[in-house]
Image (cartoon, rainbow, N blue to C red):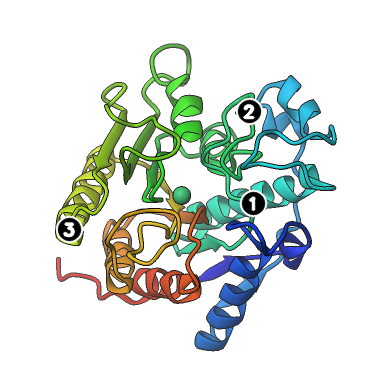
Amino acid sequence: MLILHDPQCADYGSSMRPEQPARVTKSVAYVRAAHPDWSWRVPSAVVTDETLLLAHTPAHLKRLTLARDFNADTPFFPAINEHARRAVAAALEAAQHALATRTPAFSLMRPPGHHATADQAMGFCYLNQTAIAALAAHHHFGATRVAVWDFDAHHGNGTEAILHAHAGAGPDAGVFFFASVHQFPAYPGTGAHDLGPHTRNWPVAPRTPRGAHLAALRASLDAVIAFAPDLILVSAGFDAYARDPITAMTLERDDFAVLGCWLRETHRPAAAVLEGGYSDDLPLLIDAFLTGWQNSPTPVA
Ligand SMILES: [Zn+2]
């Protein structure tokens, strides 16, 4: 297991908001102590505008440098542009590592990204590192087909919109797949239906029993596998946990371990990026997912 982490990602924000520095600092401490044999790396790459423009508009990159709040959920913070770029760098390195070694890589960074659209910061997200990594993997890292599996409790509207824009026509037609399992209705209000054969959504009603939620997750991963991707990028949010303060879902710690085991059993290069997850148990949930991903037994062929 390779963990991409830059301690600077805890240098902004407030403990008064759900998306706060302690999410990552506590998770880092827990995972480091639990797995002293895992590798850690500070992302070294400087992310260029050219790479960000794979997914975002020039106007959006400029907007991120202006000291004005984006909306109530998504304030401006000093140097948020640099913080968001570091999260992109970590996702890119995780994707490259997965493709090069076929071993797990996890970006343990903030801010999250899956709500950010081509031209808008929203839902605690400023740049969409998962969409950028998907596009970069296809255009620069040698992967032809790239799938995103988003199990955050909220719909990955930004990733969906960015990748779906490439889905229908042009040189990228048919090379990206997006699958999201999320609470519906809930923020941001999208994700009720599929947008096409490569843009799939599994809405799950609030308080759905965990077995039914897991069945939707299994179906979504089966769809990802059927797409035969060269790379699976996981938007790993942990806010579908039963005791998350901002959702009404029912998954338990063991369920996140199951998701990790399933990912391992795809036998495909995969990289995961931390998205949401706001309970005090976040370190345990991340650890369960990563441990399942790293250690699940390989089934007999
Ligand atoms: Zn979320």
* Mark closer to the observer (3, 2): 3
Q: Residues within 10 Å of mark 2 (few under 14, many from 20)?
A: many
**In 3D space, how far apart are the residues under numbered discs 3 and 2 (Cα atoms)?**
34 Å
Contact? badges 3 and 2 (CB < 8 Å): no
Q: Is residue 34 above or below residue 202?
A: below
Whether ligand 1 has any atom under 8 Å from the Cβ at mark 3 is answered as no
Give the mark, 3 or 2, whose residue is nearer the N terminus.
Answer: 2
Could you tell me how far apart the alpha carbons at marks 3 and 1 are, in whole angstroms? 30 Å
**Residue 80 appears left or right of 193:** right
Select label 3 or label 1 by which is in front: 3
Residue 96 lies, in percent from the top left, at: 57, 51
Image location of residue 274, percent across then percent down: 52, 57
Q: Is residue 92 above or below residue 22?
A: above
Count neighbours of disc 1 (C-alpha within 10 A) and say few if under 14, some if 14 to 19, many if 20 or more: many
- Three-letter code for the amino acid on which mark 2 is drawn: Gln
User: Looking at this view, is 9 or 89 the one in front?
Assistant: 9
In the picture provided, is 250 more to the left or to the right than 80?
left
State yes or no: discs 1 and 2 in contact (Cβ < 8 Å). Answer: no
- Give the side of residue 64 with respect to residue 1, left or right: right
- Residue type, numbered disc 1: Pro
What label does residue 171 carry, if any? none
Q: Quadrant of residue 194?
A: top left
Question: Residue 126 appears at what percent x and percent y?
Answer: 66, 39
- Image point 19% across, 46% down: which residue? 219
In the drawing, what numbered circle is on residue 111? Answer: 1
Q: Which residue is at a point 84% across and 48% down the rendered structure image?
A: 78
- Disc 3 crowd rating (10 Å Cα; few below 14, some 14-19, many 20+) is few
Of helix, strand and loop, which one carries label 1? loop
Q: Position of residue 225 (x, y in %)?
A: 26, 45
